Image (cartoon, rainbow, N blue to C red):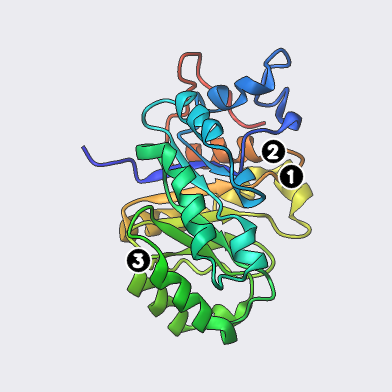
Amino acid sequence: MSPEPFLLGTGGWAYRQWVGSLYPPELAPADYLAYYARHFDTVEVASTFFSVPARHTVRAWYARTPAHFVFSPRLPRRISHELRLRHAERELEAFLAVISELAEKLGPVLVQLPADLRRSEQPQLEAFLQRLPSQPPFAIEFRHGSWLHESTFQLLEAHGVAWVVVDAPFLPRVPRVTAPFAYVRWHGRPGARAARQLDPAAALRPWVPMLQALARQAGRVFGYVQNSFSGNAPRDCLLLRQLLGEEVKVRGGPPASGPA
């Protein structure tokens, strides 16, 4: 049986502002992940961007989620922003050694580049990609327009690294597939906050044909709605799944209510 074409989740799960919209008021924060995993099959791990977690923490994530669940951790900013991908072998090895505790639940690792990292620094990106292992898979989010160049896509294709399709003010939406999977992130655009809250379906519906096209090319699409729009990321993610024709249910409970 082939895997589901879409794995959609949010950028993190440990948000107290989701109490009432996703989490029951009586739910302890330690139980947020297990509850989240009843609604979603994947999550992008925001906390790994700030520091490498302890092994026992990663093992707890594994234990609190079902067998099919997938984590997509962010590469630590120590590597991407402080070292700017240079001479980061030791830090990369240490991070992967810890995050590998997720075993078969480990999905793509997201590499977010600094906004001021330009294509003129492509040689250090090339050197970094050459040092990456074949597993886990990697995806890169570029935040400067100079990277919108054919040489960037060819470099990613050569290493099987995914170009991250973004809904953000810093880069146009470019649905390019450079790996055996696609990776999409919804940040939101200035001025879209009120519109998304009033009619989220109108903002998200244009993404449906793009996601379907990505799935036809790549086979599988990982997509993560970030914690924007007053904590409405879970709502928007569930709505995206419904727009894609998925039957949204809560495992171990009644059907999930549709987005307001």
In this view of the protein, can residue 53 be seen by the observer? yes
Provide the secondary structure element on which disc 2 rests: loop
Q: Residue at position x 59%, y 47% from top?
A: 52
Q: Residue at position x 47%, y 71% from top?
A: 128
Q: From the top left corner, tell me how far across and down residue 74 is, in percent.
A: 56, 52
| CB under 8 Å between discs 2 and 1 | yes
Is 1 placed left or right of 90 in the picture? left
In front of the other: 146 or 132: 132
Mark 1, residue position? 229
Disc 3 versus disc 1: distance between alpha carbons? Answer: 33 Å
Mark 3, residue position? 160
Q: Which mark is residue 109?
A: none
Query: Disc 3 vs disc 1: which is toward the camera?
Result: 3
Is 241 placed left or right of 116 in the picture? left
Q: Residue at position x 51%, y 14% from top?
A: 254
Q: Amino acid at mark 1?
A: Phe
In front of the other: 213 or 227: 227
Provide the secondary structure element on which disc 1 rests: loop
Residue 218 placement: quadrant: bottom left
Q: Residues within 10 Å of mark 1 (few under 14, many from 20)?
A: some
Residue 130 placement: quadrant: bottom left
Q: Quadrant of the N terminus?
A: top left
State which tag comes first along the sequence, 2 or 3.
3
Disc 2 versus disc 1: distance between alpha carbons? Answer: 5 Å
In this view of the protein, can residue 209 be seen by the observer? no
Q: Residues within 10 Å of mark 3 (few under 14, many from 20)?
A: some
When the figure is inspected, residue 249 is found, relative to residue 101, above or below; the finding is: above
Mark 2, residue position? 232
Q: Amino acid at mark 2?
A: Asn
State which tag comes first along the sequence, 3 or 1.
3
Disc 2 versus disc 3: distance between alpha carbons? Answer: 33 Å
